[in-house]
Image (cartoon, helix red, strand yellow):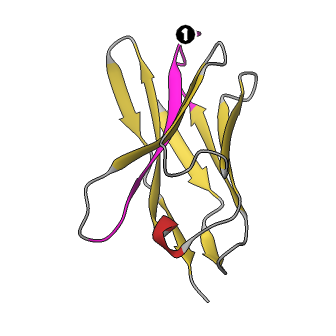
Amino acid sequence: VQLQASGGGLVQPGGSLRLSCAASGSIFRLNVMGWYRQAPGKQRELVATIISVGNKNYADSVKGRFIISRDNVKNTVYLQMDSLKPEDTAVYYCKYSARGMDYWGKGTQVTVSS
């Protein structure tokens, strides 16, 4: 499975960005896709996940500001990020999990700064 993420960039506090991650290869019908992030000097942490049947999970720090969604036909997961804060600055990684296997994308930089 290969993951291609896009949509990162530089945004001012309070702004919005939308990340996309397309999965290709041997995609299982039942899977979990999600976003994680890693800030400098910190461990990688969960941002949000969504399973193929639609159940979603969010980190407390992004609830009410971020929305995860997916298109199962395109095997693509999205992360709409609103009301961005400087503490959201990190490299964001896409993850695909199925049948006990995890696959990671290369990451996309999100910088929130004025």
Callout 1 crowding tier (Cα within 10 Å): few <14, some 14–19, many ≥20 = few
**Residue numbers of the magenta segment:** 24-40
**Residue 79 % position (x, y):** 65, 47
Q: Which residue is mark 1?
A: 30
Q: Amino acid at mark 1?
A: Leu
Quarter of the view holding residue 71: top right
Residue sitting at 35 percent across and 28 percent down?
Answer: 102
Q: On the picture, is 89 further left or further right than 44?
A: right
Quarter of the view holding residue 101: top left
Which quadrant of the figure contains the C terminus?
Answer: bottom right
Q: Which one is nearer the viewer's eye here, 60 or 89?
A: 60
**Residue 75 % position (x, y):** 66, 28
Q: On the picture, is 54 further left or further right than 45?
A: right
Q: Secondary structure at mark 1?
A: loop
**Residue 101 in the image: above or below residue 70:** above
Residue sitting at 57 percent across and 31 percent down?
Answer: 24
